[in-house]
Image (spheres, grey):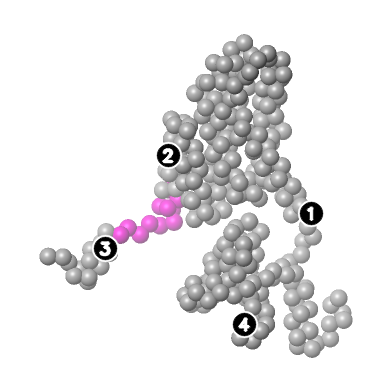
Amino acid sequence: QDPTPSKEAAILEKVVVHLSEDALWGLYDKILAGCIKVLEDVPSAVFKIGDLLAVIMERKGDQSRTDTITRIVPLVVDGVKHVISSFNKSNYSAQASNKRVAVLGAYLHCLLLISEDLMFSSGELFSQESLFNGHFLTLLSLYTDYISNEQGEVKPPGWLTPLILLFDIHEKMATIVQRRNRLPKVEHVWQYFEERHQRWTPYTAASSAIIEKAYLAGEREVCFQNGRRHYLILFNIMAQINEDNGTPRAIMRLPKEEALYKELKKKKVPTATLR
C-alpha cells in the first residue's frame, strides 16, 4: 500500500539533507577537482566540462568564478612552461601530439569557455597574472618562428586556436576594464516605474546597493528581498519581476544627483543650486 501524503512528507523530511554553506563550497571544490581530473584524462571532454562549470558559477556567484579561474590559471602556466622548455624544432611533430600538449589545449579551451561570460573578473585576473605579456607571448613567438622557417605544411598544436581566441577576448576585456576605471566616480541609484501612479520610484538604499553591486560585477540578474516580497532584476531587459506574483516593472539607473534633482523638481523645491 502506497504511503499517504503525510507519510511521504515525513519520509522526505528524514531523507533530505540540509547542506550548510561550508558543505556546499566543499561540494563545489570536489566537483572542480573532478572536472580538472577529467580534462587531464579526456581532453576532448572540454566542452561538457566548460558547460558544467558555467552552470555552477552562475549559481554560486562571484567567488566561485574567481576560484575557478584561479585554480585553472596555474595549471595553464605550468603547461605553457613545459611546452616552452621542451620545444624542439627538430622533433616538433612528436611534441605536437604529446599528451601534455593536448591537456594544455584543453585547459586553455576551458579557460576560454568560462571567460567569455566573466569579462570583468577574467580581464582583471589575466592582467594581474601577466599571462599575455609573458608566458603566452613567448610560446606564440616560438611557434611563429618555427613555422616561418619550416618548409611544407605544419600541423597546428591543440593549444594554438584557444590561445589566439584568448588573446582576442583578453584585448576586449582589458579595454572594458580600462574604460570602466576611467569613468568618473559618480554614485548611482536605481528606480522602478509604478504604472498605477505613472512615476519613477527609488529603491531603498539597501536594495539599490545590492542591484548596483551586481550590475558593476557584470551579473545578468540579481535577486533580493524587500520585506516579505522577493524580486528578480534582469539587467538585459532592465526589468524587475515580483517573484511572488510575477508582476513585471521597468527599472532604470541614474546618477544620484540627477535622481535628487528630479525628486526635488517634482516637489517644486527650488533646484537652481543643484545644477
Residue 194 makes an appearance in the image? yes
Q: Where is residue 79 in the image (x, y as percent from the top left)?
A: 57, 28
**Amino acid residing under circle 1:** Arg
Residue drawn at 50 percent across, 74 percent down: 246
Disc 3 secondary structure class: helix
Residue drawn at 67 percent across, 22 percent down: 143
Residue 129 makes an appearance in the image? no
Q: Distance between the residues labelled 1 and 2?
A: 40 Å
Q: How far apart are marks 2 and 3 (CA)?
A: 29 Å
Up-down relation of residue 146 to residue 126 (above or below): above
Q: Give the crowd class for mark 3: few <14, some 14-19, many >=20 residues within 10 Å.
A: few
Point out the tag, 2 or 4, that comes first from the N-terminus.
Answer: 2
Q: Give the crowd class for mark 1: few <14, some 14-19, many >=20 residues within 10 Å.
A: few
Residue receiving disc 1: 182
Point out the tag, 1 or 2, that comes first from the N-terminus.
Answer: 2
Looking at the rendering, in which quadrant would you find the C terminus?
bottom right
Residue 243's tag is none
**Amino acid residing under circle 3:** Leu
**Magenta residues (range):** 16-26
Point out the tag, 2 or 3, that comes first from the N-terminus.
Answer: 3
Q: Distance between the residues labelled 1 and 3?
A: 54 Å
